[in-house]
Image (spheres, rainbow, N blue to C red):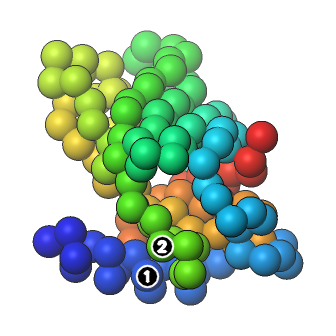
Amino acid sequence: MLAIMFVAVLGVGLISCGDDDGDGGGSSSITGTWTGQGTGDDDDEKVTVVFRSNRTGTFTVSFYDSHSGSDTETANFTYTYDEETKTGVMLLKFDDDDDSYSSYSGSGGGTETFYFWFEGDKMCIDDRLYGNPEWTLTKK
């Protein structure tokens, strides 16, 4: 299954998330802190993603929920990344006892998969294999 998802995400690298020209990622490493915001209907969301060199990281999103008001959710993740194609997959892990993320994704715990790729120096992230990115980020 993971092999199928990785092959599928390679195709995502062909989808553009902006009009920036660049070298496909800006640096040879994605490690570090990336910040940005949502696109389209999600433009009020603020996102911070920290990639560590050991293939782990944290994903934080701040958003407005009509039921609970402003909210911030954080999850740990593991990731795979292909330096040549500048594409990757993040597997976010949520505490089963923490149902706060359910207001955002509809799931109360468990895992969520996000795909990422680069357009110029911007990182594009989406929870779908196809379509426009949910978030665009730049490295801090």
Q: Which mark is residue 81?
A: none
Circle 2 Cα neighbour tier, 10 Å, few/some/many (<14 / 14–19 / ≥20): few
State the residue at coordinates (56%, 38%). Answer: 50
> Which quarter of the picture shows residue 9?
bottom left
Residue that numbered label 2 is attached to? 82
Picture coordinates of residue 23, whole percent (x, y): 78, 77
Q: Which image quarter holds the C terminus?
A: top right
Asked if the residue at tag 1 contacts the one at tag 2, i.e. Cβ–Cβ closer than 8 Å, the answer is yes
Instruction: Tell me the crowding category of disc 1: few under 14, some 14 to 19, or many 20 or more residues within 10 angstroms, Cα based.
Output: many
Mark toward the start of the polypeptide (2 vs 1): 1
Q: Is residue 42 above or below residue 108?
A: below
The answer, for residue 40, to whether it is visible in the render is no
Q: CA distance from mark 2 to mark 1?
A: 9 Å
Q: Point out residue 19 in the picture as x, y percentages from the top left corner.
A: 81, 75
Secondary structure state at the residue bearing disc 2: strand
In the picture provided, is 88 more to the left or to the right than 23? left
**In this view of the protein, which residue sits in the foreground, 4 or 134?**
4
Q: Name the one closer to the observer, 56 or 1.
A: 56
* Direction from residue 140 to residue 105 in the image, left or right: left
Decide: is 77 above or below 101: below
Instruction: Describe the element under mark 1 as helix, strand or loop.
Output: helix
- For disc 1, the marked residue is 10
User: Can you give x and y, in whole percent of width and height, for residue 117 in the image?
Assistant: 56, 68
